[in-house]
Amino acid sequence: DGFKEPQNFEITRGVVKLKSVKYANLEDGYAYVKLTSFIETTFSELTKAIKRHEKKQKDLKGLIIDLRKNPGGLLDQAVKVSDLFLEKGKIVSTIGRDKKQEEIIYANKKETKVGFPIVILIDEYSASASEIVAGAMQDNKRALIMGQRSFGKGSVQSVVKLGDGSGLKLTVARYYTPSGKSIQAQGVQPDVIIDKLDPKVIKEALVTKPVRREKDIKGHLKADRSDKDKKPNNDHLAYWWLQSDVKETDLSPKAKLLRNDFQVLQAYNYLKAWKVIQGFGTAGI
């Protein structure tokens, strides 16, 4: 019930290794990575996850980068993550208070990952370094940004050491996307706005009544050419509903992800339909 006098305890300090990247294999060459923050190991964690995917799946057909609830972190890691997918162009620029001190960071072609579409998910909690990545990928037309408008933290701080050992943090510059848009107080606007939805709401909204088609009518004219060889992409919204009565413990990591996260589900559907969208004249990535 407590001590009457102070007690001494020996405590061994352990090393806590933080991980900022979570990876999931979806199917058929598609992958999902969630970046929880931008720490010293984020870039190396991300490249390892991609290499692991390529080793198992050979080709990376499409990638979802989840930056939701990512508050930001180290600028150099945001730059490296962006540079990993950009062959050229600006990544970010900073402009000082006098409007004269401008620093521009460019992408380089070395070991760049290209040749597949990317969808980046953001929300109102995606801030700072997350917004730099989203803005760079959006302005360079390397990724489709989906979700909700980001937080809008686009200022640069610097700490000035004082004589008594304390410090004073000053705002010295602002971040700008490659096209010159200010992140501060505006955030990054998604290309496709998708609200967060409760999976239960989706299930209740789905129409499940039987559908009657031409082939169901008595005496219908039969097709003279078969398209049995053509396999349509799975309707993953219907897939979620059909699996809704299956216990969570019986589902694969991929199925859990698509079942419980509507925004990830829609990002995945966009990736699967990318080639079809390109066929209608949409600019390729």
Image (spheres, helix red, strand yellow):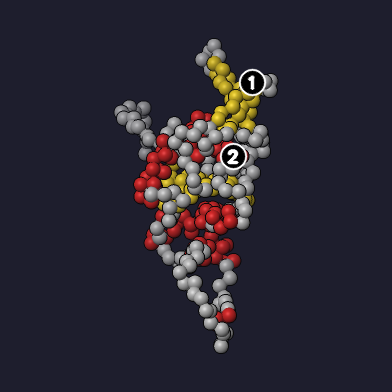
Which residue is denoted by mark 1 in the rendering?
A: 101
How would you rate the neighbour count of disc 2 (Cα within 10 Å): few for under 14, some for 14-19, many for 20 or more? Answer: some
What residue is rendered at 49% in x and 75% in y? 226
Viewer-proximal residue, 122 or 167?
Answer: 122
Question: What is the x, y in percent for residue 136?
Answer: 58, 37
Three-letter code, disc 2: Asn
Residue at the extreme front: 224
Viewer-proximal residue, 112 or 73?
Answer: 112
Residue at the extreme bottom: 219
- Whether residue 134 is visible to the viewer of this picture, yes or no, is no
Quadrant (top left, top right, bottom left, bottom right) of the N terminus: top left
Above/below status of 242 relative to 133: below
What residue is rendered at 36% in x and 50% in y? 56
**Quarter residue 16 falls in:** top left
**Closer to the N terminus: mark 1 or mark 2?**
1
In the figure, is residue 212 to the left or right of 258? right
Label 2 element class:
loop
Label 1 element class:
loop
In the figure, is residue 172 to the left or right of 163? right
How would you rate the neighbour count of disc 1 (Cα within 10 Å): few for under 14, some for 14-19, many for 20 or more? Answer: few
Above/below status of 37 relative to 244: above
Q: How far is the residue under mark 1 from the one under mark 2?
A: 24 Å
Above/below status of 162 relative to 27: above
Three-letter code, disc 1: Gln
In the figure, is residue 60 to the left or right of 190? left
Viewer-proximal residue, 262 or 134?
Answer: 134
Question: What is the x, y in percent for residue 254?
Answer: 43, 55
- Whether residue 160 is visible to the viewer of this picture, yes or no, is yes
Which residue is denoted by mark 2 in the rendering?
A: 140
**Quarter residue 180 falls in:** top right
Question: What is the x, y in percent for residue 203?
Answer: 54, 65
Question: What is the x, y in percent for residue 177?
Answer: 62, 34
